[in-house]
Amino acid sequence: ERVDDIVADPLAIMRFTVEEFEGRVAIITSFGTQSAVLLHIATKVLPDIPVVWVDTGYLPRETYEYAEQLKAVLKLNLIIKSNQEWSPARMEAIHGRLWESNTIEGHTLYQRMRKVEPLNEGLNSITPKPKVLLLG
C-alpha cells in the first residue's frame, strides 16, 4: 500500500502497526474524552490489546463511569494500576497534598508515586513486552 492510502485510513494505520510490530502493541489511557476513538480503532484490529490505566486515586466520578462504560462496550483487556504502598490518604498524611506543593521535589514525588510507579508496574505485567505504546 502507498503511504498516502495508509495515512488516510485509521484502521489501516492500526493494522500496519500491529503487523509491523508482531502484535506487540499496548495502549496507555487516561480515559479522557477522546480516548474512545483510539480504543475503538485498536480493539477493531487487535481485540485483546492490553490497555493500561493508572488510577491515581484522585479521578472524578465521571472518569470512573466513562471507563466502566468503555470497558463493557469495547470489551477492553484493561489493566488497572495504582500505588498499593501509597494510598492517597497515606501519601497526604505523610507528605501533604503534593500536587499543591510549591517545589519541584514535591511535584516530582507526586508524579512518581501516583503515576510513574503504577504505570511501570502495569507495563511490566504485559507479556510479551510491547514494542509500541499508543497513548489515548
Image (tube, rainbow, N blue to C red):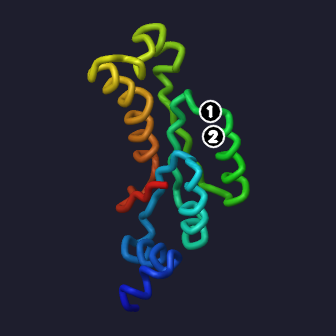
Q: Which residue is mark 2?
A: 63
The residue at 60%/54% (across/down) is 77
Using the rendered view, name the quadrant where residue 135 is placed: bottom left
73 and 10: which is toward the camera: 10
Residue 62, position as x, y percentages in the image: 67, 38
2 and 74: which is toward the camera: 2
| Labels 2 & 1 near each other (Cβ < 8 A) | yes
Name the residue furthest top: 93
The circle drawn on residue 41 is none
Q: Which residue is mark 1?
A: 60
Check the image and report above or below for 86 versus 56.
Answer: above
Name the residue furthest bottom: 1
The residue at 56%/55% (across/down) is 34
The residue at 62%/33% (across/down) is 60
Residue type, label 1: Pro
The residue at 27%/23% (across/down) is 104
Asked which secondary structure carries label 1, the reply is loop
Q: Is residue 116 left or right of residue 27?
A: left
